[in-house]
Image: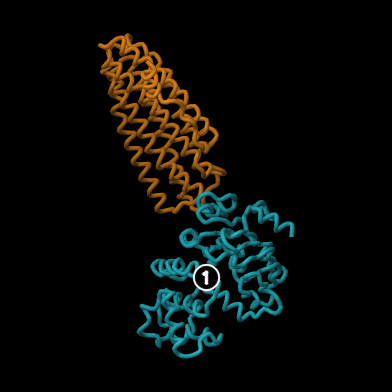
Chain colours: A cyan, B orange
Amino acid sequence: MNDIEHIENGSETASGGVSSISAGEGSPKMTTRNVEVYYGEKQAINGVSIDINMDNVTAFIGPSGCGKSTFLRCLNRMNDTIPIAKVTGDIELDNEDIYAPDMDVVQLRARVGMVFQKPNPFPKSIYDNIAYGPRIHGLASGKDELDHIVETSLQRAGLWGEVQDRLDDSGTALSGGQQQRLCIARAIAVDPEVILMDEPCSALDPIATAKIEELIHEIRGKYAIVIVTHNMQQAARVSQRTAFFHLGTLVEYGVTSDIFTNPTQEKTRDYITGRYG
Amino acid sequence: MPNSGTEHTVKAFDTDINELRGMVAEIGGRSEQAIAKAMKALEKHDLKLANQVVEEDKLIDDLERRIDDLTFQTIALRAPMADDLRELIATFKISGVVERIGDYAKNIAKRVPLITKSKKLGPISLLPSMSKVASELVRDSLEAFARRDADLAEEVSERDQVVDDFYTSIFRATITHMIENPKDIGEAAHLLFIAKNLERIGDHATNVAEMVYFAAKGEQMPERDRGENPTDIWNDAEAKE
């Protein structure tokens, strides 16, 4: 416990990084303390403590294999699907331990939604892509309510105008950027509190990327958003807080504008200025 | 800046940055030389040398343009971050400031033909020492840039007070000389402008130093006490009489 108090005061972590783990103003939506992840014998994440709050978009950056995606996947227990993965430490959503034995994982993943690198719409109609989640979670009591959820979700995802006349078309018939916004709409439809995005734009062209970034900006504040990105310019553009991971360790976590203009850690500086390895 | 020796993965980025550093060193060297030549022309009343300073200022102007073009291009193409970004922003601003220093030297050179009876203008004897200090400030501020040395930058900023003090002394002495020798007023006014140019050179060297400090540390240099304004002193003295 001493370690945690130590880093909460913004001083050095055991692993040598200097970071405030706090997400800034307001109470954190999610807190993680001393999270470690093992794939079999191999340790992938080494004692990461970080707070994520509602008002910020939080970006995770770092070189390939640094653990940023692995850590992201801890936040809605996606690592449960990997048999050899073991997660230790505390991860709480609204002060509730998400790894508690009585936690309903399906419910958790509705509260903490996820958008993946490659758009993965269901091979169903646009309408059904959005309606699927609310149906299985029993969020709509009738057709009208479901229609309403579909429309609002697509509107929030900035897709309504483009698809309102063809809701029966297949989701897979949309362009890559539209498919990704459909996936974001699908995540929004079950009324999540946190949305995790794992390199959501890496398969998209710059215009589609800009639309997703604008969308992230629009929905910020309604949901706590965490985005993993390889594109540092994107982290700089969309996030208010940035966490830099290296070799499974959180090296630095701070205000995005500080990280990109005046990082405190040598490793962060080497990475963001293109001097890394 | 810490560890500026580490190379970028993209080597061409280092090539651009090194080229810029080279050009900043060159524009600094040329400006420093322009001050020295202008002052020598003034001392020896060497009109040919004075004219040379005016001509050579075009090289300084040209260097400024080349630095700005390459900085702009590097920012656009390389999307620099952290200390790289700070250095490029500093380079962009320093080139403009150093070009101004060159202009002040040129302005001094242009006044050389207008000062014919320098032997009779007592306060002129302070100018060589003043220009030496101002010139050293220019040299040291650019040395601080080359070395990413925030301490030297701060020291330059403090040393600017010496130039300001020279200006205050020359201002007072020249006004007194004007009162006592009204027919020298024209030439004495030029002398005063030369002193003012040197004082501005000192200020601009301080501006360079402030940017070096920013580039090195990522924060602004703390404000320093600028001391008394010579014009205020004169007004005060007048008010007291």
Report the residue that reaches farthest toward the bottom.
Answer: A142
Please give left or right for residue A205 compared with residue A266 in the image.
left
Residue A156: horizontal and vertical position, in percent?
43, 74
Please give left or right for residue A35 compared with residue B180 in the image.
right
Q: Using the image, determine if residue B207 lies above or below residue A271.
A: above
Residue A182: horizontal and vertical position, in percent?
45, 78
Report the residue that reaches farthest toward the front.
Answer: B240
Q: How many marks?
A: 1
Chain letter of mark 1 equals A
The one nearer the camera, A97 or B3, is A97
The one nearer the camera, B178 or B28, is B178
Residue A73: horizontal and vertical position, in percent?
60, 71
Mark 1 burial class by Cα count in 10 Å: few <14, some 14-19, many 20+: many
Residue A193: horizontal and vertical position, in percent?
55, 73
> What residue lies at 48% left-to-right and 85% top-to-bottom?
A131
Q: Quadrant of the C terminus of chain A?
A: bottom right
Q: Using the image, determine if residue A144 lies above or below residue B88.
A: below
Q: Which residue is mark 1?
A: A223
- SS assignment at label 1: loop
Q: Using the image, determine if residue A59 lies above or below residue B52.
A: below
Q: Quadrant of the N terminus of chain A?
A: bottom right
Q: On the image, which quarter does residue B181 sit in?
A: top left
Residue type at the position of mark 1 = Tyr
> What residue lies at 62% left-to-right and 62% top-to-bottom?
A50
Q: Using the image, determine if residue B187 lies above or below residue B155.
A: above
